[in-house]
């Protein structure tokens, strides 16, 4: 699971990007939701099933606009 929330000041430009795991595009054209008018962050979670991991996971954020931001990675073992 990939966790996103734009915790930067509201003056930031919109941020759109792709996410690659081990070289494979798993999220395309993701735009971080802007904080609400009262400043509350809008968290988003992307489930990415069936990622094969042998030793490392390489995460790449490919910017299309603005500066990409990833808050957390949650690894869940699939049986």
Image (cartoon, rainbow, N blue to C red):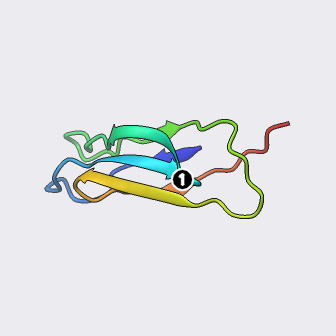
**Picture mark count:** 1
Q: Position of residue 44 (x, y in %)?
A: 44, 39
Q: Position of residue 10 (x, y in %)?
A: 18, 53
Q: Residue furthest right?
A: 79
Q: Quadrant of the N terminus?
A: top right
Residue located beneath label 1 in the image: 23
Q: Residue furthest bottom?
A: 55
Image position of 79 (left or right of 6): right
Q: Residue furthest front?
A: 23
Near-viewer residue (41 or 76):
76
Near-viewer residue (3 or 36):
3
Q: Position of residue 50 (x, y in %)?
A: 70, 37
The residue positioned 69% from the left and 63% from the top of the image is 56
Near-viewer residue (29 or 69):
29
Q: Quadrant of the C terminus?
A: top right
Label 1 element class? loop
* Quadrant of the image occupied by residue 66: bottom left
Q: Is residue 71 above or below residue 36?
A: below
* Quadrant of the image occupied by residue 40: top left
Image position of 79 (left or right of 50): right
Q: Residues within 10 Å of mark 1 (few under 14, many from 20)?
A: few
Q: Is residue 79 above or below residue 39?
A: above
The residue positioned 20% from the left and 47% from the top of the image is 14
Q: Position of residue 28 (x, y in %)?
A: 39, 38
Q: Is residue 58 above or below residue 31?
A: below
Image position of 14 (left or right of 51): left
The residue positioned 17% from the left and 56% from the top of the image is 12
The residue positioned 21% from the left and 59% from the top of the image is 9
């Amino acid at each position: 699971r990939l966790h996103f929330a734009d915790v930067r000041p509201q003056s930031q430009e919109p941020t759109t990007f792709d996410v690659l795991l081990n070289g494979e595009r798993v999220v395309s054209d993701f735009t971080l939701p802007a904080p609400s008018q009262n400043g509350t962050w809008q968290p988003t979670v992307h489930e990415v099933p069936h990622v094969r991991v042998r030793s490392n996971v390489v995460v790449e954020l490919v910017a299309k606009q603005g500066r990409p931001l990833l808050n957390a990675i949650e690894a869940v073992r699939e049986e």
